[in-house]
Image (cartoon, helix red, strand yellow):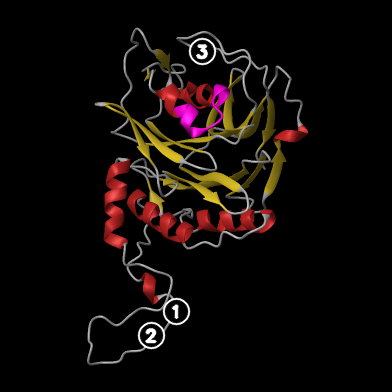
C-alpha cells in the first residue's frame, strides 16, 4: 500500500510513501536523455527528457516506482490489486507494458495535458518483465504544478480521472474515494461547534476537536481521507526548505510503523521510504525507515546528455 501527493507552496512538490513488506533493493536512479529504453512492443526510445526517481534496476533497466522528468512532470505507480486489468496486444494503438508506463510518459511529455493526449492511444499490455518479475497490479498518479490526474487500467478500459485533491492511495477505485470524502466534509482544523445541545453551552476541553472523526487506521480509504485533510490544512506560503520539511510531515501522517499492518503472509508492511521532489529544480529528497535524515540528490549534478543511467544506493 502507498500514498502519493502533489503539493503547491512557493514551488511545486511531488512525492510518496512506499509501503511494502519486502524490498526490491531500490535506489535513486537518474536516467539521462540519451539512455535507450528498450521497449517490448514499440520502437525503442533513444532520446528523451531526463528523469529522476526511485527504481529497482534489473539487467540495466530502471523499473521506476515514481519519477519526475526535467520539465517537472511526475508519476507514481501505486498498488491496485484485484482492480488493475491489463490487456492483450492490440493493433492501431501504442502497446505499453505497465513497467514501461512511467518512462514512456515522462520521456516525451512536459505537462499533464500532454500525458492525457498520449493516453488516448495507449494500451497497457499483459507482458511480464521476466519469469522472476511478474507484473504488479497498479494505478497511476500523474501531476505537474497545475493539475493532477489518476489513471486506472480497468476491465472496462483505461480510465482517466481528474484528481482535484492531489492525493492517491490504493483500493477501491478513485471515484469511490472521491465519493467517500463526502462523509468527512464537516471536519475542520478549528474549534468544534456545539450543534448537539443548544440549551447547554459546552466548551471545548481540547484543541483539535473539529477533526473528531478523522480516520486513524492504515487502510487505503482512511489514509486517503487523512492525507487530504492534512494537505488541505497545510500552509502554502512556505519557502523551499520549510516546504520540503512540511511535505515530509504530511506524508508522515499516513506512514506505517512496522508492526501495525500484517499481510496474509504474516509479514509486516511498513513505510520503507518517503520521497519528495522539488519538480522545478529536479531536487529529489528521501528518507528511509532506518534513516529518517532527509537525503538530497539533484538531477543537475549529473551529465544529463549521457547514455548511461546513474544509480545511487538508498541510505
Quadrant location, the N terminus: top left
- Looking at the rendering, the stretch of residues picked out in magenta corresponds to 106-115
Q: Are marks 3 and 2 in contact (CB under 8 Å)?
A: no
* Label 2 residue SS: loop
- In reply to whether residue 111 is colored magenta, the answer given is yes
What count of labels does the image hold? 3
3 on left or right of 245? left
Q: Residue at x 57, y 31 (%)?
A: 55
* Label 3 residue SS: loop
Q: Which residue is mark 3?
A: 39
Q: Which residue is mark 1?
A: 207
Q: Is residue 167 above or below residue 98?
A: below
Neighbourhood count class around disc 3 (C-alpha, 10 Å): few under 14, some 14–19, many 20 upward: some
Structural distance between the alpha carbons of marks 3 and 1: 55 Å
Locate residue 169: give its quadrant: top left
Which mark identifies residue 204? 2
98 on left or right of 66? left
- Residue 58 location in percent, x, y? 57, 21
Q: Residue at x 29, y 83 (%)?
A: 194
* Nearer to the camera, 166 or 298: 166
Give the mark nearest the N terminus, 3 or 1.
3
Quadrant location, the C terminus: top right
Amino acid at each position: 500500500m502507498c500514498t502519493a501527493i502533489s503539493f503547491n507552496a512557493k514551488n511545486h512538490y511531488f512525492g510518496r510513501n512506499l509501503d511494502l513488506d519486502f524490498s526490491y533493493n531500490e535506489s535513486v536512479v537518474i536516467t539521462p536523455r540519451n539512455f535507450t529504453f528498450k521497449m517490448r512492443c514499440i520502437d525503442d526510445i533513444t532520446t528523451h527528457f531526463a528523469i529522476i526517481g526511485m527504481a529497482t534496476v534489473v539487467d540495466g533497466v530502471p523499473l521506476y516506482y515514481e519519477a519526475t522528468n526535467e520539465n517537472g512532470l511526475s508519476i507514481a505507480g501505486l498498488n491496485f490489486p484485484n482492480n488493475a486489468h491489463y490487456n492483450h496486444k492490440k493493433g492501431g494503438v501504442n502497446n505499453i507494458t505497465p513497467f514501461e508506463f512511467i518512462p514512456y510518459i515522462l520521456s516525451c511529455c512536459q505537462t499533464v495535458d500532454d500525458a492525457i493526449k498520449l493516453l488516448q492511444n495507449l494500451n497497457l499490455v499483459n507482458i511480464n518483465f521476466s519469469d522472476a518479475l511478474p507484473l504488479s497490479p497498479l494505478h497511476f498518479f500523474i501531476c505537474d504544478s497545475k493539475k493532477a490526474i489518476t489513471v486506472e487500467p480497468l476491465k472496462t478500459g483505461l480510465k482517466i480521472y481528474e484528481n482535484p485533491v492531489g492525493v492517491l492511495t490504493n483500493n477501491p477505485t478513485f471515484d469511490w474515494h472521491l465519493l467517500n470524502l463526502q462523509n468527512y466534509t464537516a471536519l475542520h482544523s478549528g474549534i468544534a461547534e456545539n450543534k448537539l445541545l443548544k440549551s447547554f453551552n459546552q466548551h471545548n476541553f481540547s484543541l483539535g476537536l473539529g477533526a473528531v472523526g478523522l480516520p486513524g487506521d492504515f487502510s487505503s480509504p482512511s489514509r486517503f481521507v487523512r492525507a487530504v485533510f492534512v494537505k488541505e490544512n497545510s500552509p502554502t506560503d512556505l519557502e523551499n526548505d520549510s516546504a520540503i520539511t512540511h511535505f515530509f510531515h504530511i506524508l508522515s501522517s499516513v506512514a506505517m510503523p512496522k508492526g501495525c499492518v500484517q499481510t496474509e503472509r504474516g509479514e509486516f508492511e511498513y513505510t520503507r521510504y518517503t520521497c519528495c521532489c522539488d519538480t522545478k529544480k529536479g531536487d529529489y529528497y528521501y528518507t528511509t525507515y532506518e534513516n529518517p535524515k532527509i537525503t538530497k540528490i539533484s538531477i543537475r549534478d549529473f551529465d544529463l546528455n549521457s547514455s548511461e543511467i546513474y544509480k545511487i544506493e538508498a541510505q
